[in-house]
Image (tube, helix red, strand yellow):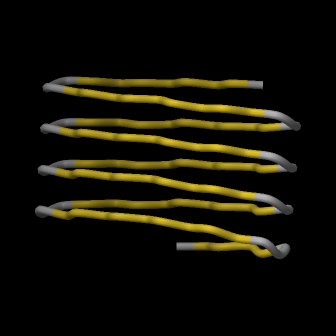
Amino acid sequence: MFCFLFTITRKLNIDLNISITRRLNIDLNISITRKLNIDLNISITRKLNIDLNISITRKLNIDLNISITRKLNIYLNISITRKLNIDLNIADNLECSLCF
């Protein structure tokens, strides 16, 4: 199941590259008022739940590179008022849960 909800008032570039071999749920809820670049590269071989809730008022660059071989739950809740660069490179062979 893929849910993409976008409210955009300025420039937005979203690049989604997803290779899936098992179950995947992605929820993207993005409200944007300034420049935003999101690059999602996801290669998945097992169960994965990704929940992205992003409210942005300034420049933001998010780079997600996730290679997963077991169960992984990622919850991203990001509220941003200034410049922010996030670079996530996650390679996981075990069951884990990340909350930011």
Q: Position of residue 41 (x, y in %)?
A: 50, 42
x 22%, y 63%: residue:
85
| Figure quadrant of residue 97 | bottom right
In the depicted view, which residue is nearer to us: 69 or 9? 69
Q: Position of residue 48 (x, y in %)?
A: 78, 50
| Figure quadrant of residue 32 | top left
x 18%, y 48%: residue:
57
Vertical order, 28 against 64 (above or below): above
Vertical order, 17 against 65 (above or below): above
Q: Position of residue 86 (x, y in %)?
A: 31, 64
Q: Quadrant of the N terminus?
A: top right
Classify residue 90 as left or right of residue 68.
left
x 42%, y 37%: residue:
30
In the depicted view, which residue is nearer to us: 46 or 60? 46
Classify residue 34 as left or right of residue 30.
left
x 23%, y 27%: residue:
12
| Figure quadrant of residue 22 | top right
**Number of callouts in the render?**
0
In the depicted view, which residue is nearer to us: 86 or 17? 17
